[in-house]
Amino acid sequence: MSALLEIEDLYARVGDKEVIKNLNLTINEGEVHAIMGPNGAGKSTLSYVLSGKPGYEVTSGSIRFKGKDLCSLSTEERAREGIFLCLQYPVEIPGVPVSTFLKHAVNAVRKHQNLPELDTFEFLKTLRAEGKKLGIDNEMLKRPINVGFSGGEKKRLETLQMTILKPVFSILDEADSGLDIDALKVVAEGINALRNEHNSMLVITHYQRLLQYIVPDVVHIFADGHIVKSGDKSLAAELEETGYAAYRNE
Amino acid sequence: MPGLLQSKEMEGSELIWLEALRQKGEAAFEQSGIPTAKTEAWKYTKLRMLNADDFEFPSSEEQTCHCGCHRHDGEDEHCHCEGHDCTCHVDFPFEGYVLRFKNGAFVAPHPKLPEGVEVMTLMEAAHLEEDVKAKLGKLIELDNYPFAALNTAYLEEGLFINIRKGVKLEKPLIIDHLARPQDKNLFWNLRHLIVVENGADAEIIENYRYRGAEKSRYFANIVSEIYVGRNAKLRHYKLQDEAFKACHLALSAVQVKADGNYRHFCAQKGADVGRNEVVVKLVEEGAEARVDAAYKMSGWATLDTTTDIRHLAPHTKSEQLVKGVVDGDAKGVFQGRIHIAPDSQQTEGRQLHQALLLSDRAEVDVKPELEIFADDVKCSHGAASGELDEEQLFYMRSRGIDADEARQILVEAFLDDALMQVEDEAVRIWLKSVLQ
Ligand SMILES: Nc1ncnc2c1ncn2[C@@H]1O[C@H](COP(=O)(O)OP(=O)(O)OP(=O)(O)O)[C@@H](O)[C@H]1O
Ligand SMILES: [Mg+2]
């Protein structure tokens, strides 16, 4: 089993605040890792650092993806290499319909893979079919992306994007927040459909519930910018009992 | 320096009323001169170029060919050229009756028009139509509009368009103006008189384009007087894509009668100084107007949208949405006035200007003015300017979309709601693609 993502002695800052401090994490091909940790621990910051968001600066250490240095790549290059970030707070873009947005995205990735642009008709057919599975109807696909979408609808749409873009490595930042119980199942199914021996995931969540659907291979407890404890899926259940008290300020 | 008032032999000088009107124009322009920054209505839009350079009228032999290809067919004075380098004909992605102009002069022939639609040159009409004498110059207070005064002093070239009572025009009339800049600085005046009679329905598109010497200067001074009758509807669309050293100043003065509807949309992207000014007088109950615009510019250009909507009767309604994208060292100007006269009760006037600034040096100057003398009215105005949203950019890039492409998508999306006001879908798509 080869490593897909290797983070070594990573320090990163946002603004002038050091948020990621001495982080080490290796995720192999096909593995699902869960990260749990208190508010403000730096989980979302880690997801942004991995996506190369402007303003998030790696101060030392390294991140390797498929054996190559990730930090030298731009956000869009990372996406085309197969990194997908399912945002905790998806962004609204007035004037840009979901279908237009996704068509640009899919074609950008295809261009990178030297594949021809998708035929609009074929693309829309796939989009509608995948949307239907996630409870997203055609009307929603015509609406400007995330504008006026409910919290749950936004998360479904993130999942739809992931389904369409078929990333190798997905970072799910609280994909479960704002979802009702039924929607949680639907979204989890969508995510699970992407699991295979090559694709890996980093699932950030506060609740064990999501992990009952998306069963992780490894669970990490993340506090103060790094991993303080790792274990198997039973660690999540344990946390639900004890909370983070024991891990704060180590 | 000869200045902009130069001697010119003009058609129609035997018409006493026309000569009198020209003289009134000349006197008014002599009085005002070229506006300076001290002139309130022109304080944001600098006209240095008009003061610094000499301009001359195009000589008449330059007028004959639309494209300058000089491949004419025997005695026929219009061009049949189909060469690849020929720019006589531009293909619009929609059907219409195309009326061609080059360097401020009409280029024959007229297209065949359906019954009830009359189009002739303004000078033909001045001799034939009583209506011209009654309507020409009546919608503009020359003392307040220096360039309309200048235009009136040289009132000659242009069209008289008359849509007869109740006539519904199926296809738009397209006034396609081609500028062929030359090594000397050219200057032309163009004047249209458009009458949409009671119950008629029409669409008019003005297209301003150029071919040839990019860096040449020229000054296009355009005035249209537009009468929209009772229950009549006019969609008036315009694209200003002049050469980048050009000065394009246009004024549309519009009168709308009871239950009439005037819709104006102007897309501006060309010229060094471009001003599209629209004055609408809603003179009877139920009259409505929409005046919308989108502009996109970079370099050192100034693009100006100036509107003045006068609600002169009760139950009148107006709406304006103007959106601009400004890059480089360019400057966008929006001056919008809504005037509601005493007794014009139950009127609605709304106005919104939004600008997207793509560089640190880009600038917008906005001057909204509400003059409300009635009490039972709904009025609003708003202005906002901002930069591209970093979160939106990141979101798109995180899906693999190139940063430049993401910016372009966001710019298009920004202009989209203004463009949505163009009712004719084919024209909307055309304007959208031109503004890309
Ligand atoms: N742009 C910023 N400037 C300064 N501080 C920031 C910035 N963004 C995040 N932080 C800080 O970094 C810390 C980590 O934030 P982050 O959003 O990564 O936490 P989190 O673990 O995702 O929390 P939650 O569970 O609440 O989502 C917080 O203290 C936050 O205030
Ligand atoms: Mg977070």
Image (cartoon, helix red, strand yellow):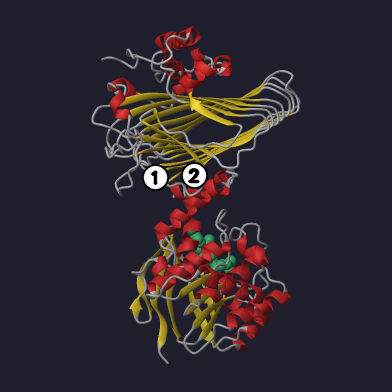
Disc ID at residue B386: 2
Q: Is residue B384 above or below residue A113?
A: above
View extreme (left): residue: B183
Identify the subunit bearing mark 2.
B
Is residue B166 visible to the viewer in this orientation of the structure?
Answer: yes
Disc ID at residue B359: 1
Q: Is residue B338 left or right of residue B357?
A: right
Report x, y in % for residue B202: 60, 36
Cα–Cα span, label 1 and label 2: 10 Å
Report x, y in % for residue B257: 68, 25
In this orientation, which residue lies closer to the viewer: A62 or B306? B306
View extreme (bottom): residue: A1
Which of the 4 image quadrants contains residue B373? Answer: top right
In this orientation, which residue lies closer to the viewer: B379 or B280? B280
Which of the 4 image quadrants contains residue B80? Answer: top left
Q: What secondary structure is marked by label 2?
A: strand
Which of the 4 image quadrants contains residue A112? Answer: bottom left
Q: Is residue B99 left or right of residue B67?
A: right
Q: What secondary structure is marked by label 1?
A: loop
Disc ID at residue B171: none
Q: Is residue B366 above or below residue A206?
A: above
For disc 2, the neighbor class at 10 Å (few under 14, some 14 to 19, many from 20) is few
Circles 1 and 2 on the same subunit? yes
Q: Quadrant of the N terminus of chain B?
A: top left
Q: Earlier in the sequence, mark 1 or mark 2?
A: 1
Report x, y in % for residue B322: 54, 38
